[in-house]
Image: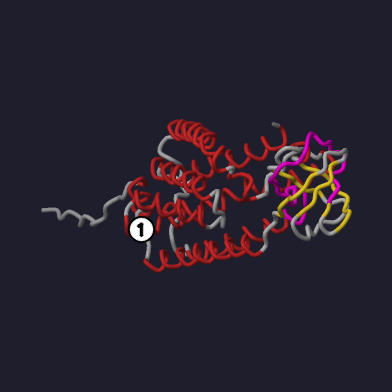
Amino acid sequence: MTERPPIEATTAVPAEMSESTRSQTPVPRSKLIGWVALVVVLASISYAANLLVSTDTEVVAATNTSPVVITTDGEHGFATGDTVTVRDVEGNTGANGTWEVTVRSETTLVLDDSEGSGEYTAGGTVATGDLLYRWSTVIGGIVQYGIILAIVLLIARGLAPAVLGLRPPPSWRSAAGWIAASIVLIWIIGALLNPFLEAGEEQGLVPDDWDPDRAAAFVANFVVVALVAPVVEELTYRGLGFAAVQQFFGGGVAVVVTALAFGLAHGLVIALPVLTIFGLILGWLRLRTKSLYPSIILHAIFNGAALLASVTV
C-alpha cells in the first residue's frame, strides 16, 4: 500500500482579507494621547497668537475726501507703501477696500486712490491686506505645515497607511458624488451663516483684490493653502485623529471630536462654528467612504475656491 505524502497545513489568505486585516490593526492608546496633546498645543499656540498679535486696528474717523484719510484709535504700525484692508466703515463706505497707504502720522493713513462717498458715521477696522501676496507667508506656511506633518508622522509611526485612511474608497464614483453633495452643503451653510458671523474676515488671510504685479507670490501661497494645508490637516485630523478616536469610541464620536479639534486648532472665535461644521462634513465623508482621499479633495476644493473667489468675484 502506497503511503501518501503528508499534506502541509497551509491556508492561502486572500489578498483582500489580508488588506482588511491590516486596516483593522488596533491603534495603541499612546497614539490617541499623542494626538490629543498635539491638538492642545496647536490650539493654544493659535489662540495665543491671535490674542497677543492682533492685526486689526479700530477706525475712528474717515474724511469725505479724495483720497480718504482715516484715523485710528491707536498707533497703526504701517509704513508708506504697505497694503491694508479697511472693512465695516459706515457712512463713508468709499473707505472700505484694499489700498496702498501713505502714512501721515502714527494714527492717520491716506488711502491712495480712494474716493470719499459720504460722512463717516461709525465703525471700521484696518488690517494688513496682502498676506497672500507675500513670499514670507509662503515660507512661514511651508515651515508650519512641515513641522506639523513631521510630528504627525512621528506619532503615527508603526501604523499601516490603511489605518490612517490612505487607501482608495470602495467606489470612486460614489465618493465623487458625496464630495459634490458636500460642496453644495458647505456653500449653503456658509451663505446662511456669513451674514451673521462673517467668519472669512476674522482670519484676515484672504485678499479682496487681484494684484497682477505679485501674481507669483499669490500662486505660491495658493499651492500652500489649497494643496499643502489640506493634505497635512486631513492627515492630522481625519487621518491619525479619526483612527485613534474611532478605535476607542466609535466612528460617530470620531467625526465630532475631530471636527471640534479642527475648529479649535485654527485659534478663531467667530469662525469656530463654521470651521466645526466644515470639520463635521469632512469627518462624515471620511467615515462614509472609508478613505482619507475624498476628505483631502473636498478640503482642497473648498480652500482653492475661496481664494479664487476672493480675487475674481
Judge from the rendering whether residue 184 lies leftward or rightward of residue 21; answer left or right: right
Residue that appears at 21% across and 55% down: 7
Number of numbered discs visible in the structure rendering: 1
Q: Is residue 185 above or below residue 144?
A: above
Foreground of the two, 218 or 49: 49
Q: How would you rate the neighbour count of disc 1 (Cα within 10 Å): few for under 14, some for 14-19, many for 20 or more?
A: few
Q: Residue at x 37, y 61 (%)?
A: 27
The residue drawn where x is 54% and y is 65% is 44
Which quadrant does the C terminus fall into? Answer: top right
Horizontal side of residue 134 vs 278, given as left or right: right
Estimate the x, y position of residue 271 in percent, counting from the top left.
55, 48
How far from the left and from the top, in percent, is residue 108? 83, 53
Using the image as rendered, state which of residue 54 and residue 253 is in the foreground: 54
Residue 297, given in percent of the width and then of the height, sits at 54, 41
Q: Give the range drawn in magenta.
A: 109-138
**Residue located beneath label 1 in the image:** 25
- Please give the name of the residue rendered at 34% of the width and 54% of the height, measured from the top-left corner: 24
In the image, residue 41 above or below residue 123: below
User: Is residue 159 on the magenta stretch?
Assistant: no
- In this rendering, the answer to whether 191 lies above or below 202 is above
Q: What element carries label 1?
A: loop
At label 1, the amino acid type is Thr
